[in-house]
Amino acid sequence: MHWNRQQMKRAVREKRGMWILDAAESGGGIRFWEPAGRSRWVPYTQAFCFTLEDPHLHRDMLDALDDRYGLSECRIQTIFGDEAGYSIAASRRVAELIEEQSGYSAKIYNLDIRPDQRFLAERGETACAWPGDDRFSPHFDRSLSVLEIQVLDPEYRSRSISGMIVDGRRIAGDGRGLVEEVAAALDAKNPDLILFPHADYWMPHLLARAEEHGVPLLISRTGRYRRISARSYQSYGTVVHREGALIPEGRCLIDSARSFTFRESGVAGVLLASRLTALAPNLTARFTPGTLISSYENYEAIRRGVAVPFRKWDAESGRPVPELREADKGGMIFKPHPGVYDDVVQVDFTSMYPSIIVGQNLSPETVQGGGGEGFLASVLAPVLSLRLRTKALKKEDARFAGMDSLLKWMLVTSFGYTGYRNAKFGCIRVHEGITRHAREILIGAKEIAEDAGCRILHGIVDSLWVTGGDISRFVHETEAAFGIPTESEAYSWIAFLPMADGTGAYNRYFGRLKEKGMKIRGVAARRRDVPPYVRSFQEEIFSLMEQAESSGELRQLAGRADEVYADAVRGIEMAATEDLVITRRVGRTRYKHRCIEGSALRAYGMAGVAVEAGMEIGYVVRDGKHLIADTPWEAKTADRAYYRVLLDRAYDEVKGVFSKGGTGDVRKRGGDVEYK
């Protein structure tokens, strides 16, 4: 038998299995896509299971469920142990009715797991990997064909498309010709991955234009799209808005302007997230790090045969106030004294909180007296090991930086989710246990530093700033004592800034790194709500500071810093309005009292642009005294005096380092800054 090359490739592929790019429910099963558009449909019916405190009290309900859906008895393995229960292939609504009729004593499991994720987990397979691949390896195939698309019209204030860049070519026009060019590029390249800034806004308009002109535009390989609804929600006290989205089938579409995962970790991070969670890149590109770590834990549970609870039943119970005060102290902080310090080393514990979870075997069942390896500790251990590998690899090869960033964010949120009230595998006592161990580590590290003759200048949760003594000995003994690796950064000098009461701020500092560059935290140059003109001024001041190798040399730059400031003051009168745009995330869409943000929202409304809570808006202040703001595209004038105040504040918060006493001479009073 003689096979041609295509037949041989097909035979090898079928023997090896599928490298899954996308998945979607389809006609009583799941359709999986490989790169280049090949697909396979598999039948799959998903069942959930439940337990009842006293099944005899609910015999009529059980009989009715058996008659209609078919009910089977089963054993349900949870992280707390084995329970007798029932399995049923029925809808979410049926599960909710079971809860209601049981007086909410029924416990439901494996209900809200995506069918494609569960199918793969039950077989030990995953997305963006060949069967048998090591999910926790940083070395994997990323060779996807990519097409880049960009609409040149301004999003939100425009619903028409008059210009695009498609695969590097600029296309102008209106109507049929433009969408035909996009369709031709799709046909010619047949991309697996489309990078499209603001895709979630433009996709409905682009598809409507194609339909209007009768042009087949197969961004989805089937022509069908799944819809994700827009919503606003709270995350760590901040209102966030998520755009609605049209998800294509068979290709991955990434909104490269809005995807946090893509912005922080690139394509490599999106694909690694898919390998860890068994979710398609279309989803991992849109999910937050918290959703990704939760999805990863769900996958691991199903893969291990552990049931995933539908609701959280072990919520925090009432406790005496003294016990709460002792248990719920949070992270440790050693507040700095404001000032400029020479020859300082910052020592950071790598992934401290996840390391504590793994090292101390913390999990909901272990803190409640269960023995053996805890579920949470066991599922985080390989992710933590992978993070340590990518952290080392990225120093030699920048291609691993994206993966390292993804893992960092997933591990950071793994701690927060232990205390989240709806986390499937969360528990407040685990959360408290982590912070307790972290406090003990920081206090212990402080004692080791002092024994080595070092002085602690500042400490916050998982970082210490030390000077003097034998720092190498301190680092070595600290790592040996607590079993957590550290990473160090050496500063030529560092400035800790004051709070309003004159004491040191724990999150506002900047300094010159000995290797290269400045490290800056908590000041205007790092804040997103500072207009570009003011931000670039402060960045110029920091560039000047970088020339100083000591606090003494900093003071010699005071005159030049004043010149930079004077130039910025003169230039503000001629600054372009686009350099004066203030960008802020609005937490509400209505304000009871007059304010700049309320005026900006009214301006957006008058321009026909709908703003939802949690969205970011930009505006230019036309009249600061009367609180009047315009949209960036309608702004003709700006209140230069208002922006002069912002410029002064940006200089005031950093210029203390040029004085003899450093930032120790700075005292804040209200919104003003006074230098003695």
Image (spheres, helix red, strand yellow):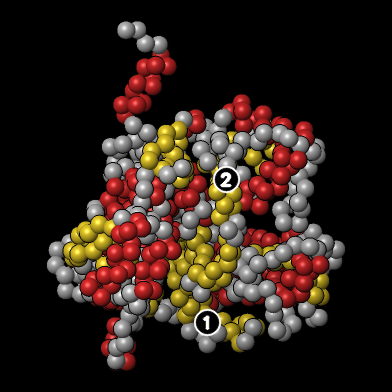
- Tell me, for residue 228, which label it has, or none: none
User: Looking at the rendering, in which quadrant would you find the C terminus?
Assistant: bottom right
User: Looking at the rendering, in which quadrant would you find the N terminus?
Assistant: top left
Image point (36%, 58%), residue name: 68
Residue 529's x, y, as percent? 64, 67
Residue 179's x, y, as percent? 72, 36
- Tell me, for residue 499, which label it has, or none: 1
Image point (34%, 26%), residue name: 14
Q: Amino acid at mark 2?
A: Tyr
In the image, taking residue 375 as reference, residue 284 lies left or right, namely: right
Q: Amino acid at mark 1?
A: Met
In the image, taking residue 630 as reference, residue 184 lies left or right, namely: left
- What residue did someone put label 2 on? 225
Q: Nearer the viewer, residue 212 or 445?
A: 212
Badge 2 local density, few (<14 within 10 Å), some, or many (20+)? some
| Picture layout, residue 46 above or below residue 623 | above
Regarding residue 516, the answer to whether it shows in the image is yes
The local secondary structure at tag 1 comes to loop
Residue 32's x, y, as percent? 43, 38
Image point (42%, 78%), residue name: 336
Residue 452's x, y, as percent? 24, 70
In the image, taking residue 311 as reference, residue 54 lies left or right, namely: left
